[in-house]
Image (cartoon, helix red, strand yellow):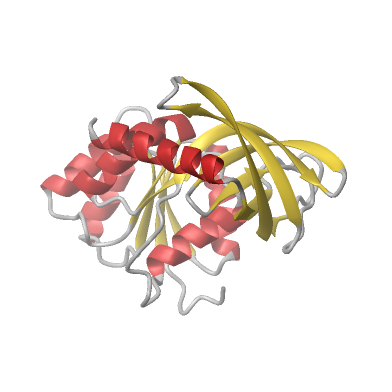
Amino acid sequence: MIIKKPANILLADDSLFCRAKLSDILLDGGHQVTFAFDGAGVIDEVGRSSADGIDMLLLDLQMPHVGGFRVLEWMKENGYVGKFPIVCIMSARESRETSKRLAKDYGVGEILSKEFTHKEVMAVVNKHLYPSKDSSRREYRMPVNLSTEFKSGLCKHGGAILNISQTGLFLQTKLKLLAGTLISLEFTLPDSIKGEDVIVNARGEVMWSALPSDSENRFVGAGIRFKGMSVSDKRRIDGYLAVVELRVAAT
């Protein structure tokens, strides 16, 4: 997407690797980046500027000393929640348990998995910086970490599903999947009714892909939209999402 104007994004992460990778993505997308190396740096930057000039906060929740949760508490106590969009960075397993609470208590707009890709970052950032007029109903995407086997043509490949919704998923793979490619997937979900794992089969179309620049790049994959599955498999996905959301909401 062509951005309307550069945004000043405050990026807080104690990991040099994540800071470098995220800043490269954001700068490449036309945005400006200010760094905080821990939660104390975020509090100092937000307090010093009174949030003026900050268009978005990308906040790692797992930082030493002053962590991301303490930052969110401080922002809430001092009236900064709602001043600008907040996107939190955390592992898929942890985000499953806390994403609803973060949205409800602190106004966090979205959770970005630490297994992020270039296109995932830009899609999340630009969605919250420049919300479309018809985006009143947003589909919830559940962060997960599920192994999968999929077929593209006659060949079978391995990968991982990093988020899933009622209409699609993000597939992490080093295979170059071009937009429009049709694939079939097989993955396992826990069945809340039977109390055991069940295999789900689905067909999908590649809507977009982040292609690897080299064979060592693991932050690649594709956004998949479901194109067909059985009624029972669709119910399993819907049931899984509903149960996990209720479980998170109850925490």
Find residue 8 and report its horizontal and vertical position in percent.
40, 65
The image quadrant of residue 195 is top left
Q: Is residue 67 visible?
A: no
User: At 67% from the left edge and 34% from the top edge, which residue is drawn?
Assistant: 148
User: At 19% from the left edge and 44% from the top edge, which residue is drawn?
Assistant: 105
Q: Of 251 and 64, which appears nearest the observer?
A: 251
159, above or below 9, in the image: above
242, above or below 140, in the image: above
User: At 46% from the left edge and 73% from the top edge, which residue is drawn?
Assistant: 6
What is the residue that sits farthest to the top in this orientation?
Answer: 196
Find residue 240 and report its horizontal and vertical position in percent.
43, 36
What is the residue that sits farthest to the front in this orientation?
Answer: 231
Find residue 135 and report its horizontal and vertical position in percent.
37, 70
158, above or below 52, in the image: above
Find residue 175 and report its horizontal and vertical position in percent.
79, 46
Q: Of 116 and 39, which appears nearest the observer?
A: 116
The C terminus appears in which quarter of the rendering? top left
Q: Is residue 248 visible?
A: yes
What is the residue that sits farthest to the right in this orientation?
Answer: 154
User: At 47% from the left edge and 42% from the top edge, which residue is drawn?
Assistant: 235
Q: Of 249 and 202, which appears nearest the observer?
A: 202
Q: Is residue 59 left or right of residue 158?
A: left
4, above or below 62, in the image: below
How many numbered circles does the render carry?
Answer: 0
The N terminus appears in which quarter of the rendering? bottom right
Q: Is residue 170 left or right of residue 176?
A: left
